[in-house]
Image (tube, rainbow, N blue to C red):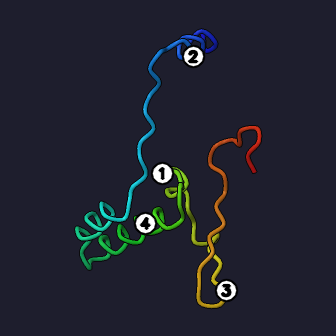
Amino acid sequence: MLSRTRKAYAKRVELPKKKDALTKGPLQLVLVTCDDSLKGKRDRTLLLFAWASGERRRSEVAAADVKFLNRPENHCRFWARRVSPCKPGCR
């Protein structure tokens, strides 16, 4: 059944459009809505983390854990673990 579904999708003329990445302007409009409450600070941090780390999937942002955060000399480095299986050719 899955192979028939895949073949049907492959034969479709119009493929689903990939969503454009969030740019700085719209991001700033969303950040303005985050207040100084604990939830607002959390939301702001997650939005900035997702945007600054570039092309991170929502599932990877949701799975982020502080134990993967490294803070060498005045900057932060986050080591992301793969949430979905790696396709051939990816690292």
Determine which residue is flagged by label 2. Answer: 10
Q: Which residue is mark 4?
A: 46
Residue 43: x, y in percent?
A: 35, 67
Pointer 4 or 3: first along the chain? 4
In the depicted structure, whether residue 25 falls above or below residue 86: below
Rendered image quadrant of residue 53: bottom right
62 above or below 49? above
Q: Residue furthest bottom?
A: 73
Toward the viewer: 29 or 64?
29
Which mark is on residue 58? 1
Instruction: Tell me which amino acid carries mark 3.
Output: Pro
Residue 91 placed where, x, y %?
75, 51
Question: Viewer-nearest of labels 2 and 4?
Answer: 2
Residue toward you, 15 or 7? 15
Classify mark 3: helix, strand or loop.
loop
Residue neighbourhood size for the residue with mark 2, other residues' Cα within 10 Å, grouped as few (<14), some (14–19), many (≥20): few
What residue does disc 3 label?
72
